[in-house]
Image (cartoon, rainbow, N blue to C red):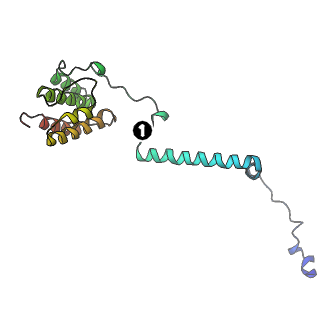
Amino acid sequence: MDTYSKKTDFIYDDAPAPNLSLWDRFWLWVWDLIGKTLNNKVTGGLVKYLAIVVLVGLVVFLALKIIGADLKIFSRQSQKVEVPYTESDDNIHEINFNDQIEKAVATANYRLAVRLLYLRTLKKLSDRSLIHWLPEKTNQTYISEINDPDKKKEFSKLTHQFEYVWYGEFFIDKENFYIIKDTFERFNLPGS
């Protein structure tokens, strides 16, 4: 052992320190500071839990973005849809649905057109005494008022489509609008 300890190849104490650049020394200092903070009994636990909370929050946020959830708290206010009459004062017996639907389609406001199709359907159901229309009733109340099970099922599907488009603020293009419009028109055919 004495023989080896005297050979220069095995003497490590005299090895020159590596020549570190200013950038390398900065990062060495940062990682040293992080290591001391994490190993400290007082701040280490707090920092570790804070890091875990931030990482979990980031993962949840990314997951919601990936599945397409609209997080309004992180974005600007949703786009307003101009309605030619006040929503709270809707009186389905006073609206000229054909004119209003044509205007909405002409301006490519298909969401509003779907809303008008739904209101026109409520009017037709009310005119046939299948529902009792009141502005403060919910869509689910109207579904429950329909006694015919087949009609109830069809109207429930229409309501679901309307709620997705109007309240869910889903984009709807011309092609999909005409598919939805056809569904509403078949439901509203006399005798159906």
Relative image position of residue 108 (x, y in whole percent): 25, 29
Question: Vertically, is 127 above or below 143?
Answer: above
Three-letter amino acid code at the position of disc 1: Asp
- Residue at left offset 89%, top offset 66%: 13
Q: Secondary structure at mark 1?
A: loop
- Front residue of 141/103: it is 141
Q: Please indicate, yes or no, whether residue 22 appears anywhere in the rendered image.
A: no
- Front residue of 189/1: it is 189
* Quarter of the C terminus within the rendering: top left
Q: Is residue 25 left or right of residue 49?
A: right
Relative image position of residue 135 (x, y in whole percent): 26, 23
- Front residue of 146/48: it is 146
Choose top left, top right, bottom left or bottom right for residue 57.
top right
Relative image position of residue 47 (x, y in whole percent): 69, 47
Choose top left, top right, bottom left or bottom right for residue 183.
top left
- Front residue of 63/152: it is 152
Q: Please indicate, yes or no, whether residue 71 appears anywhere in the rendered image.
A: yes
Q: Residue furthest left?
A: 191
Relative image position of residue 168 (x, y in whole percent): 34, 36
Q: Is residue 70 left or right of residue 157?
A: right
